[in-house]
Amino acid sequence: KAGVTQTPRYLIKTRGQQVTLSCSPISGHRSVSWYQQTPGQGLQFLFEYFSETQRNKGNFPGRFSGRQFSNSRSEMNVSTLELGDSALYLCASSFTGGETEAFFGQGTRLTVV
Amino acid sequence: SQELEQSPQSLIVQEGKNLTINCTSSKTLYGLYWYKQKYGEGLIFLMMLQKGGEEKSHEKITAKLDEKKQQSSLHITASQPSHAGIYLCGAASTGNQFYFGTGTSLTVIP
């Protein structure tokens, strides 16, 4: 079966702009989680969506938001980009989230200049 | 919040050598996952451990979860260059959050 697909793979934006990243989960999976990975902070949880509802949110500012559509595809939006937002953004899908096995996409490498 | 500490932070080994990576949790683990990541790419699921004392193997990689369920180890036998990458342990907590360890960077020298 097809894996988790993230688009785009690479993105370069300037400070102050906004960006939208997309994640298509594995068919049948209803939970999508987003993570930010930076050399200094490692992998950090952003938020998790299940059946179009945000179930949990990590400790990120309100500039980071997301949504999930009825087909379980999810988008993540970052507004007013800062240099520190440069990171690899990973999404993971699973059947129900929590302790079920999560499958990760290849990630979107965002560079803010 | 749950914290997962991995050691060592980085490892450089000669091809053919065995190695062990540890993951220690600040809380009891109810499910411990091991992932491998190539630089700049997504995570590849290796295995999941749930029961205290459980041990699983896949090819030359063996992972164990200790009886008290607060520590896990990942052991690679006869390492190969293909084993190189970043190894991450992860655990789910209440509230559907998933936490990752600090990561261990493995380099295998041919």
Image (cartoon, coloured by chain):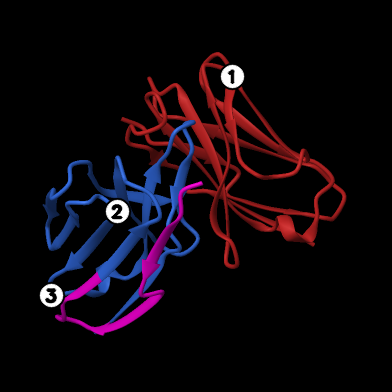
Chain colours: A red, B blue
Number of numbered tags placed on the structure image: 3
Q: Chain of mark 2?
A: B
Judge if badges 2 and 3 mark residues of a common chain. Answer: yes
Q: Is residue B102 left or right of residue A21?
A: left
Name which residue type carries label 3: Ala
Q: Residue at x 78, y 60 (%)?
A: A83
Mark 2 residue crowding within 10 angstroms, few (<14) / some (14–19) / many (20+): some
| A73, A48: nearer the viewer | A48
For numbered disc 2, what is the local secondary structure? Answer: loop
Q: Residue at x 36, y 75 (%)?
A: B8
Give the labeled residue for mark 2: B70
- Quadrant location of residue B102? bottom left
Q: Which residues are magenta?
A: B1-20
| A48, B13: nearer the viewer | A48
Give the numbered dot on residue A53: 1
Mark 3 residue crowding within 10 angstroms, few (<14) / some (14–19) / many (20+): some
Q: Chain of mark 1?
A: A
Q: Position of residue B63 (x, y in %)?
A: 19, 57
Mark 1 residue crowding within 10 angstroms, few (<14) / some (14–19) / many (20+): few
Q: Quadrant of the C terminus of chain B?
A: bottom left
| B61, A73: nearer the viewer | B61
Give the labeled residue for mark 3: B78
Q: Residue at x 39, y 77 (%)?
A: B10
For numbered disc 3, what is the local secondary structure? Answer: loop
- Distance in Å between CA atoms under marks 2 and 1: 32 Å
Name which residue type carries label 1: Thr
- Quadrant location of residue B91? top left
- Quadrant location of residue A19? top right
Judge if badges 2 and 1 mark residues of a common chain. Answer: no
